[in-house]
Image (cartoon, helix red, strand yellow):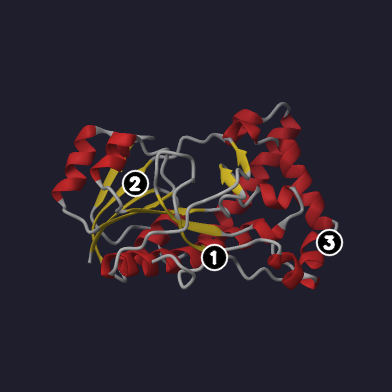
Amino acid sequence: MRAIVLTSTMRRHQFVANTLAARMEVAGVWQEEKSFQPLKYAESADDEAVIARHFAARDASEERYFADHAAVRAPVHRTPPGGCNAADEIHAMRVLRPNVVLVFGTGLLKQPLIDAFPGMMINIHLGLSPFYRGAGTNFWPLVNREPEYCGATIHFIDIGVDTGPIVAHVRPDIQRGDGPHDIGNETIVAAADALAAAAAAHVASPLQGVVQTGGGRLYTRSDFSAAAVRRLYANLADGMIDEYVARRAARDAKVQLVTMQAGTR
């Protein structure tokens, strides 16, 4: 099996690329630079401090979880934000003749790229689609006191925003004392395993996926704010995780998830 990986430049992205490279031939990794600048959503010096602390804690957590992944262990192509959509990059991808194209953390992928690899592009969406789509989709469930909606979706890419047929959902094993970045990184570990398994299954015998139904909630980057960060940490201080863990089975059962064994072929 020959894959290419389209991703970004943070430690989490390098971990996923390396996890895949350890399990299959990865002929090339395209790393798009991130364009999200969270401090621009601050409206005061106090807002800036709140946002900066949140993202500094995220970076420190990723350093701990993914300490061995300071570099990608496969040939790398670096691009600016949105660069995977450039015609010359698409040509370079096609030259490698992959069996599957695996995606995590890029910007929006456009029609020419999707058309170049029909039925071959499988994505990690950090969030449970169709319930939470768009940006920050493991952040907003915690803001909304819904840890049961934290997780990731392995799905085929179409032209919509996280709307393609679903191959599998995964959830983190949330424990008392977990913070938002523990939950996020535990989700990434589970999602990397699931993406590798989905790729192998799809190449062996093409998967169809489960068509998404229902609109769910769509968040954009412009929805982010310091007020939302404050609300998340207030929820944690108010026992949100303990409440969830105490009633995990009942709360998880409210969210219908897809597994690779449940009709995705």
Please determine whether, in this image, residue 222 is positioned above or below residue 216. above
Return the mark for residue 31. Answer: 2
Q: Residue furthest top?
A: 43
Q: What is the x, y in percent for residue 258?
A: 53, 64
The residue indicated by pointer 1 is 170
Residue at x-position 57% and y-position 65%: 186
Question: Which residue is more in the foreground, 154 or 230?
Answer: 154
Q: What element does badge 3 sit on?
A: loop
Question: Which residue is more in the foreground, 115 or 248?
Answer: 115
Label 2 is placed on what type of residue?
Gln
Label 3 is placed on what type of residue?
Gly
Q: Residue furthest right?
A: 238
What is the C-alpha distance between the residues marked 2 and 3?
38 Å
Judge depth for marks 1 and 3 and give the one in front. Answer: 1
Q: What is the x, y in percent for residue 135?
A: 56, 42
Residue at x-position 80% and y-position 59%: 240
Graded by Cα atoms within 10 Å as few (under 14), some (14 to 19) or many (20 or more), the crowding at tag 2 reads many
Q: What is the x, y in percent for residue 166?
A: 47, 57
Please determine whether, in this image, residue 148 is positioned above or below residue 118. below
Return the mark for residue 239. Answer: 3
What is the C-alpha distance between the residues marked 1 and 2?
24 Å
Q: Quadrant of the N terminus?
A: bottom left
